[in-house]
Image: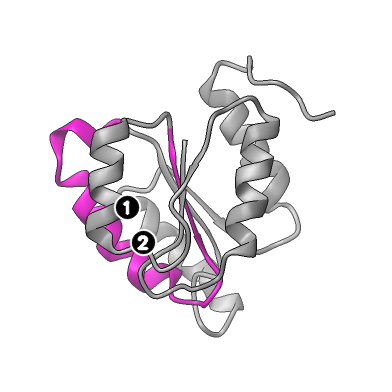
Amino acid sequence: MIVSSLASDAHTWNLVFLQLLIEELGYDVVNLGACVPDELLLSETLDRRPRMVVISSLNGHGYQDGMRVIGRLRAHAALTDTPVVIGGKLGVLGAEGRSHVDDLLAAGFDAVFDDDAESVAVFRSFAAALSGGTAREPG
């Protein structure tokens, strides 16, 4: 799987957390890090053909940057079936991020996880389901 931030997001602790969480589930992870330019995310996704792309946003620009990035990823026929998810702070005001979920899904994301308390558990289930439930359970 690929874990990445967006071009405008310099936060890294969230990416390390996601990498460790996904590795607990039994997946190999390529962590592209913070401030990832759209072109780098696109080229790495095309080159690596990951099981899923996980995009995390903490600066509140997840909606704005996510809408741009998903359009670029989905424009490539080779990536139309690659699961791409986004999560974290989707808007700068916090709670308004929930209003962006439908737009992000309609734009091509397979799942959207806002920054509420249940998101980690829901994400864990979503990621485990990609392997038909055969990914390792934590512990």
Residue 55, image x and y in percent?
46, 54
Task: Tell me the kind of residue under disc 1.
Answer: Ala
- Magenta extent: 52-81
Quick one: 118 or 139, which is closer to the camera? 139
Quadrant where the C terminus sits is top right
Q: Secondary structure at mark 2?
A: helix
Q: 10 Å neighbourhood of mark 1: few (<14), some, or many (≥20)?
A: few
The image quadrant that residue 83 belongs to is top left
Quick one: 50 or 77, which is closer to the camera? 50
Q: Which residue: 29% across, 30% down?
A: 81
Quick one: 83 or 106, which is closer to the camera? 83
Looking at this rendering, what residue extends furthest in the right direction? 139
Residue beneath label 1, please? 106
Residue beneath label 2, please? 103
Looking at this rendering, what residue extends furthest in the bottom direction? 93
Q: Secondary structure at mark 1?
A: helix
Q: Which residue: 23% across, 37% down?
A: 46
Indicate whether 42 appears above or below 94: above
Q: Which residue: 32% across, 32% down?
A: 48
The image quadrant that residue 93 belongs to is bottom right
Task: Tell me the kind of residue under disc 2.
Answer: Asp
